[in-house]
């Protein structure tokens, strides 16, 4: 299956979650087993020398865990505030339509762990930047970051590269 076929399965939903927002829905890629397998394989290509995959809630958890399984690596979730038990570290960030906070459990990453960070969509860059900051708080190193879809015309890439110029940022698709 080609990347073009995968890209064609991404659905655009206008005015979601708020009027004026164009939402790119990757759930059709997850529903079809051939699409999901190919998507997982393609995302896995961006893993270099890593110890663990970290995925960002919500769809980044699905993609990250599938990539970790494919690579034979462990998986660590970054969750929305209040979803993880025990002691956590947190990082707040801005979205196109508000603010939110990500958390990671203390002690799940070791100092020096090499991480592949995965999320579904890159828009403003806030979520991915918060993810890197949390990973760095743990003493781990982000080897690279990958998203399934990058929205062209929004400042996500420039914001990310401005904050972390030494971390490679990859996108399967740009729309």
Image (cartoon, grey):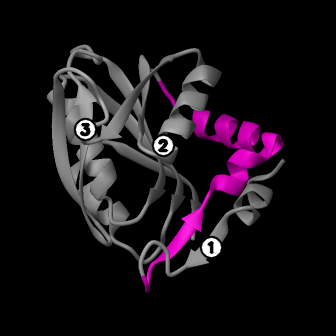
Looking at the image, residue 10 lies above or below residue 133: below
| Relative image position of residue 53 (x, y in whole percent) | 45, 27
Q: Is residue 85 left or right of residue 53?
A: left
Q: Which residues are magenta?
A: 19-48
Q: Is any atom of residue 166 visible in this view? A: no
| Relative image position of residue 36 (x, y in whole percent) | 72, 42
Q: CA distance from mark 3 to mark 2?
A: 18 Å
Q: Is any atom of residue 22 visible in this view? A: yes
Q: Is residue 141 left or right of residue 168?
A: left
Mark 3–mark 2 contact, CB under 8 Å?
no
Say whether disc 1 or disc 3 marks the residue closer to the N-terminus: 1
Q: Is residue 44 magenta?
A: yes
Looking at the image, residue 95 lies above or below residue 133: below
Q: CA distance from mark 1 to mark 2?
A: 18 Å
Q: Nearer the viewer, mark 3 or mark 2?
A: 3
| Relative image position of residue 138 (x, y in whole percent) | 19, 24
Say whether disc 3 or disc 2 marks the residue closer to the N-terminus: 2
Q: Residue at x 16, y 22 (%)?
A: 87
> What element does badge 2 sit on?
helix
Q: Nearer the viewer, mark 1 or mark 3?
A: 3
Nearer-the-camera pick, 120 or 5 = 120
* Residue topped by disc 2: 60
* Residue topped by disc 1: 12
Q: Residue at x 31, y 64 (%)?
A: 158
> What element does badge 1 sit on?
strand
What is the quadrant of the C terminus in the image? bottom right
Mark 1–mark 3 contact, CB under 8 Å?
no
Say whether disc 1 or disc 2 marks the residue closer to the N-terminus: 1
* Residue topped by disc 3: 82
Q: Residue at x 42, y 16 (%)?
A: 51
10 Å neighbourhood of mark 2: few (<14), some, or many (≥20)?
Answer: many
């Amino acid at each position: 299956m080609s990347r073009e076929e995968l890209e064609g399965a991404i659905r655009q939903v206008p005015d979601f979650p708020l009027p004026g927002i164009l939402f790119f829905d990757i759930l059709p890629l997850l529903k079809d087993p051939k699409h999901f397998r190919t998507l997982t394989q393609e995302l896995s290509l961006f893993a270099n020398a890593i110890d663990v995959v970290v995925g960002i809630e919500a769809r980044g958890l699905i993609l990250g865990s599938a990539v970790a399984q494919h690579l034979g690596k462990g998986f660590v979730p970054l969750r929305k505030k209040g979803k993880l038990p025990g002691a956590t570290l947190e990082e707040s960030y801005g979205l196109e339509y508000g603010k939110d906070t990500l958390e990671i459990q203390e002690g799940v990453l070791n100092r020096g762990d090499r991480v592949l960070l995965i999320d579904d969509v890159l828009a403003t860059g806030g979520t991915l930047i918060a993810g890197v900051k949390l990973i760095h708080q743990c003493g781990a190193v982000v080897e690279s970051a990958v998203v399934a879809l990058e929205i062209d015309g929004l400042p996500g890439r420039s914001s990310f590269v401005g904050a972390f110029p030494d971390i490679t940022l990859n996108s399967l698709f740009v729309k």
